[in-house]
Image (tube, helix red, strand yellow):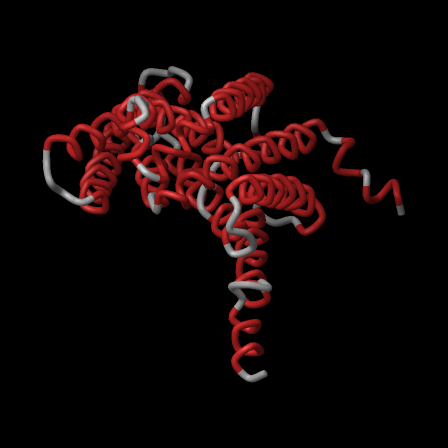
Amino acid sequence: MIEYLLEPFSYGFMVKAIWACTLVGGLCAYLSCYLILKGWSLIGDALAHAIVPGVAFAYLLSLPYSIGSFFAGFLAVLSMIAIKIFTKLREDTVIGIIFTSFLALGLVIASFSPVSVNIEEIILGNILGISDHDILQVIIISIVCFTAVTLKWKDIFLVFFDESYAESIGINIVYMKILFFTLLTASIVAALQAVGAALVIALIITPGSTAYLLTDKFNKLIILSISIGICTSGIGSYLSFFLDLNPSGLIVCLQSLIFFITFCFSPKYGQFSRFYKLNN
């Protein structure tokens, strides 16, 4: 029985897939706490699709897709911040403009050479085919992002919680936003290989949303969110070996399942709990 349960770890591609998914899941869950705090979860969706033209362009030039996707995401971040600063448009409007424009540009670039550009891999990911170079890239990105956010977590928290107060005590609002969204872009680049552009949004929204239903304290929110991200990503990729299912889809399904269970049974915000309190 033990040999059967340990069988996935006898294959190198599964070991790399599990490690990569676990790291990416924890990292995205960490950043999701701040997006939920600010109510900017759709920005993660925009960035996940904004990197598509960078990936497609990198494929055409036979460059590492991570380079193209990072610069495309960074350009999208600067564009959103610039439009917001110099116009009176709401965040959701700016996000919609950037999201559709960059995604359309990616499809146009991909159509130049549909054979060399693997759209399916961009959208759905290919975690079972991750190379040693890619797993090293995931490790480096995870370490850098975890370290940077942890060192600046108080400043980022203040900016996202109360911009006016943060600015009054001397925090550079624009700089902190650019720093955070640059790290978010790097995290999405790492997650792209694991779950693809279509599902990466779930990794940076669902863990934080689930944790938010369980606690009002931000430090506990971070711990719960990271725990959910790590566990669901690791277990999902592990179970995909036995169930012969797509790892990325299974990971997102597990996160969604935990969210809906929490939504129903959370002691404070659970719908069944509220119903019980109203009737007793």
Q: Residue furthest left?
A: 87
Please report the residue visible at 16 percent of the width from the left and 31 percent of the height from the top. 85
Considering only vertical position in the picture, is 126 above or below 212? above
The part of the image, by quadrant, that contains residue 23 is top right
Q: Position of residue 7 (x, y in %)?
A: 80, 38
74 relative position to 105: left or right = right
Considering only vertical position in the picture, is 44 above or below 149? below
Q: Can see residue 57? A: no
85 relative position to 145: left or right = left
Please report the residue visible at 45 percent of the width from the left and 38 percent of the height from the top. 196
Q: Can see residue 269? A: yes
Considering only vertical position in the picture, is 269 above or below 127? below
The mark total stands at 0
Please report the residue visible at 32 percent of the width from the left and 16 percent of the height from the top. 61
Q: Residue furthest bottom?
A: 279
Q: Position of residue 4 (x, y in %)?
A: 84, 44
| Quarter of the image that includes the C terminus | bottom right
Nearer to me, 171 or 267: 171
Q: Position of residue 181 (x, y in %)?
A: 35, 29
Nearer to me, 191 or 171: 171
Q: Position of residue 155 (x, y in %)?
A: 40, 27
Please report the residue visible at 56 percent of the width from the left and 55 percent of the height from the top. 214
Considering only vertical position in the picture, is 174 above or below 268? above
Nearer to me, 216 or 147: 216
